[in-house]
Amino acid sequence: MCSVHDTVEFEKRGIPSTTIVTAAFRKAADFQFRGKGMEGHPYVVLPHPVSNLQPADMRELTMQFVDEVAGYLKS
Amino acid sequence: MNEQVDEFEFFLEKDWSDGLPVVTPTEERIARMLTGTKRPPDEVIGPIPPAMEIATVESVAVHALMAGCKPGYLPVVIAATEMMLRDEFNVNGVQGTMHGVAPMMIVNGPYAEEIGIHGGNGCMGPGFRANAAIGRAIRLILMNLGAGIPGVSSMTIFGMPSRYTYCLAENMEDHPWDSLAVSKGYRPDENVITMAMVESPRFCFDDVSDEPDRLLNGVADTMVAMGSWNMHTRSDMVVAMGPQHAAICANAGMSRADVHSRLCEIAGRKVGDLKNGGNWRRERALAFPIDVDPDDDDSFIPAIKDPQDLQLIVAGGWGPCTAVCHGWSGGSRAVHGSYQV
């Protein structure tokens, strides 16, 4: 879960950051945030799976989460 | 066991185990384990992902002890812990992945023989203390210091039996060629560990072939499957030829390099075949570090995208079998390194 570690390191430096996972990795993300002392830090959960999506479908899914990601990055 | 605490149950209840009883790490036993290394107990080995607990010589010794190691095994466990933290090995990715690969340890050199790491009959286990305990120590470190706990931080779908322990030597007694370590440029008298993130073995039984062409066709077929990541990304692979199969090649005049090269050349499938199932995606093929045309059904996709990703060893007992261990999707490169005793 490198992305959780990256988020924690950015946040420690005062740079807003979030993590994007698919639902199957939610437990792992919760565990990592808890372990890094940032329990409850918000992150973005995409439906699982995404690896079988075609590029156009992936783009469409991505667009549904742009506002949520942007919201975390502005906070 | 004292009247209040059954220490075996205690460690299992604490989730400080792989599910089997561990040796209780008393101070006396830890001190004895530390006699296996000249390195100071507080020397830092590094953070074990994803929890990033710091492994020290002492904490590695504690886990070696819990796994059932003798003090003499400790230099191997310490060296393997250091090696698996190299960036290119990407142990962090493997700790979280849905796949179920594990770090296979191939230990070459005189010290492996001295401490009894087995490379002959049944070398992938069970039955040999050094193989079992050294590999298990690595797993306990990954679980206890790294928190690679299935369903919590590890999203492995199945896990696999080789996640309990995965350590062996080559069968140098019946080996027709130089060891893997020597093929990588090490001296025969150097103590060397290779670690590769691979699945449990699938076997190529062939008691029919008596010449290399037919034999290697069968081995190459075992290196390929629609659902194998070796067909859909650059991925490591271990091919452990049984001495009998290796001898067929050697007796026909083939060197280790010849066999290695031949397998890299012929193990693969055409695009048209791969499209019919498994992980085929055009985008994945476009990301290969080799030139293939994903729109040409006749384009050949090799299982080994870079020859250095195939670790060819000779191990196991006499018999008509070769073991093939497929790799992981997430970008882990096998690591090699010598260590001091």
Image (cartoon, helix red, strand yellow):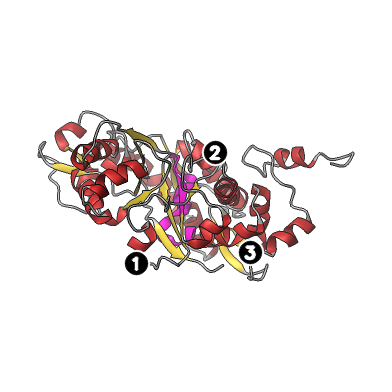
User: Which amino acid does the dot numbered 3 rest on?
Assistant: Val
Which residue does the numbered mark 3 point to in the structure image? B57
Q: Are marks 3 and 2 on the same chain?
A: yes
Badge 3 or badge 2: first in the primary sequence: 3
Number of dots carrying numbers: 3
* Residue A16 seen in render: no
- Give, as a single range, the part of the protein colored magenta: B83-106
Taking the spot 16% from the left edge, 37% from the top edge, the residue there is B271
* Crowd rating for badge 1 (residues with CA inside 10 Å; few <14, some 14–19, many 20+): few
Taking the spot 26% from the left edge, 50% from the top edge, the residue there is B250
- Where residue A64 appears, as percent x and y from the top left, is 35, 39
Which residue does the numbered mark 1 point to in the structure image? B185
- Where residue B188 appears, as percent x and y from the top left, is 41, 65
User: Which amino acid does the dot numbered 2 rest on?
Assistant: Pro
Q: Chain of mark 3?
A: B
Badge 1 or badge 3: first in the primary sequence: 3
